Image (cartoon, rainbow, N blue to C red):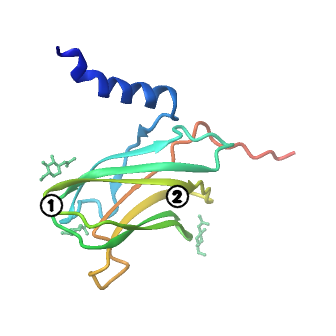
Amino acid sequence: MKISHFQPLLLLLASSLFFLPALRAVDFKYCNKSGYDFGNVSRVEISPNPIEPADYELSITVSGYASKSIDGGSIEVYAKSENITDLLRRSPISPIKAGTKFEFPLSEVPKDILEGEYKYVIALLDDNVGDPEKPILCVDFDLPTSAPTLVSSA
Ligand SMILES: *[C@@H]1O[C@H](CO)[C@@H](O)[C@H](O)[C@H]1NC(C)=O
Ligand SMILES: *[C@@H]1O[C@H](CO)[C@@H](O)[C@H](O)[C@H]1NC(C)=O
Ligand SMILES: *[C@@H]1O[C@H](CO)[C@@H](O)[C@H](O)[C@H]1NC(C)=O
């Protein structure tokens, strides 16, 4: 019977619809504009989305495909404006094999509001690559806020 085949998917859908805040995709760009030799990113999802003024942290999931392998490294989340870079989270990652898909779930990332224009940046760093300033994969995106934050001038 075909029905039973679809049940896990239905359950998954039901649980994400009813028991978890929606994880929704955001538009992202590669930090270096053109992409990276290491691999590519297919989706960046954020929860909650949109982010309300009362929310103080978010979950981010980055999914993609690794063309190259990585033995060990870390993933960093920054908020970055013209003059300020706040490191919000840094986590070690498990090795990834070349030719496989990857998914990084990043929970409890602080919400950071910077003055002026700013982006959230997610950078993948390889322990075996000397320059920590040079991520092997990096994307950035705007935080999906529900409305501009109005600052009372009264
Ligand atoms: C982006 O990074 C890749 C290496 O991963 C490099 O080949 C490419 O030239 C870079 N693009 C820019 C605009 O720096
Ligand atoms: C990522 O790269 C793989 C392998 O080259 C390709 O099949 C896939 O379509 C790419 N995905 C995106 C989102 O670019
Ligand atoms: C960043 O710093 C420069 C130089 O101090 C200043 O001119 C500029 O207004 C600053 N930008 C923001 C968004 O604060």
Going by the numbered disc 1, the residue's amino acid type is: Ser
Q: Residues within 10 Å of mark 1 (few under 14, many from 20)?
A: some
> Quarter of the image holding residue 74?
bottom left
**Is the residue indicated by label 1 positioned so its CB lies within 8 Å of ligand 2?**
yes
Which residue has dot 2 on it? Answer: 118
Going by the numbered disc 2, the residue's amino acid type is: Tyr
Q: Secondary structure at mark 2?
A: strand
In the image as oriented, which residue stretches furthest toward the right? 154
Q: Residue at 23% across / 60% down in the picture?
A: 35
Screen quadrant of the C terminus? top right
Q: Reading the chain from its start, which is encountered first: label 1 or label 2? A: 1
Report the front residue among 137 and 142: 137
Screen quadrant of the N terminus? top left
Relative to 29, is 23 on the left or the right?
right
Report the front residue among 18 and 59: 18
> Quarter of the image holding residue 95?
bottom left
